[in-house]
Amino acid sequence: MPVRLQLLTLAARSAEFAGWLYRDAGALDEATYWYDRATEWAQEAHHPAMQGYVLLRKSQMAYDTRDAIRVLTLAQAAELGPYQLPVRVQSEVSQQQALGLGMLGEPLDAVERKLDDARSLLSQAMPDDEGSQLLGATFSESTLQLRSAACYTEAGRTKHAANLFGEVLSSGTLSRRDVGYFTARRAAALALAAEPDEAAILAIQSVDVATSANSQRTMRVLTKVVDALEPWMTTRPFAPCAKPSGRSVRRSSPP
C-alpha cells in the first residue's frame, strides 16, 4: 500500500506538470483534463496539499481566459481548504488573490494588502522547507516581483508594472522562454502606459522567442500588445511591430 500511495503522488505531480505544459501550449481543455486527474490522484494518495496546489494552478489558468471571478475564488479556495499548504505556496496563493482583486477593479490598497501578505509569507520560507522540496519550488523573490507587476498592470499602475518587469528581466536570471513571456508582459504594460515605441520594440523581441518556443501563452499576450498599440498606428509613426502571426502591423504615414 505505501508503494501505491507513492506512485499515486508521483502520478498527481506528473499530471499537474502535464496540465501546465498544455496550458502553455494554449490547449486549455487538455490542461483542464490533466489538472482534474491531478486532483483525483492526489485525493486517492491522501495528499491534500497537492489538491490545494492544483486549485492555485486552475486559478492561474483562469487568468488566461480573463475569468476574473474564478481567478479570485479558486485562489481563495486554495487558501481556505482543509489542508496546510507549504509556506511558498501560501505566498503564491496570496499573490494570486491580489491579481483577482486587481482584475475585478477593487481598490489598490486591497491589492497591495494581499501582496504584502505574499511578501511576508515568502520571507518565512526556509531554503529546505517542504515548499522547496515538493510544491512551490520555483516561487522566489523574483517570481513574486514578476507576479506583482501583473497585479499592478491589472490595477491600472501600468508604468510601475513595467518598471518591475524590467528590473527582473535585467537581472539575467530567467530562462529564455520566461524572458520571452515577461518581455511580452512588459510590452503590454508599456503600451497601456502610453509608451508605444518601447512597447513595439519589446514586442518584436518577444515574438522571436515565442515562435521558437511555441509558447501560445506568450502569443496571446502579444496579441493584446498589438490591440493596445492600435491608437498609435493611425496618429503617429513609431517603431515597427509585427503581429504574432508574423505579418507586419500596418504603420501610419508621417503626420
Image (cartoon, rainbow, N blue to C red):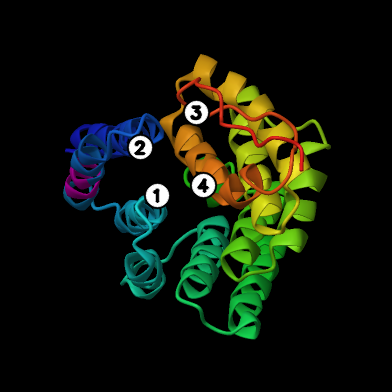
- At label 3, which amino acid type do we have? Pro
Is 130 on the left-hand or right-hand side of 191?
left
Which of the marked residues, 4 or 3, is nearer the chain's N terminus?
4
Q: Secondary structure at mark 1?
A: helix
> Badge 2: how crowded within 10 Å, few (<14), some, or many (20+)?
many
Helix, strand or loop at label 3? It is loop
Asked if the residue at tag 1 contacts the one at tag 2, i.e. Cβ–Cβ closer than 8 Å, the answer is yes
Which SS does the magenta portion mostly show? helix
Q: Gap between marks 3 and 2, in whole Å?
A: 18 Å
Q: Quadrant of the C terminus?
A: top right
Which residue has dot 4 on it?
227
Residue type for callout 2: Arg
Q: Give x and y (percent) for residue 193.
A: 71, 59
Task: Tell me the kind of residue under disc 1.
Answer: Asp
Name the residue at the top extreme.
Answer: 212
Q: Quadrant of the N terminus?
A: top left
Residue 157 on image: x %, y %? 69, 68
Q: Gap between marks 4 and 2, in whole Å?
A: 22 Å
**Which amino acid type is shown beneath numbered disc 4?**
Asp
Using the image, tell me which numbered label, if any, was put on residue 244: 3
Residue under label 2, please give it: 23
Q: What residue does disc 1 label?
A: 64
Kindly identify the residue that appears in the image at 68 percent across and 46 percent down: 186
Q: Nearer the viewer, mark 1 or mark 3?
A: 3
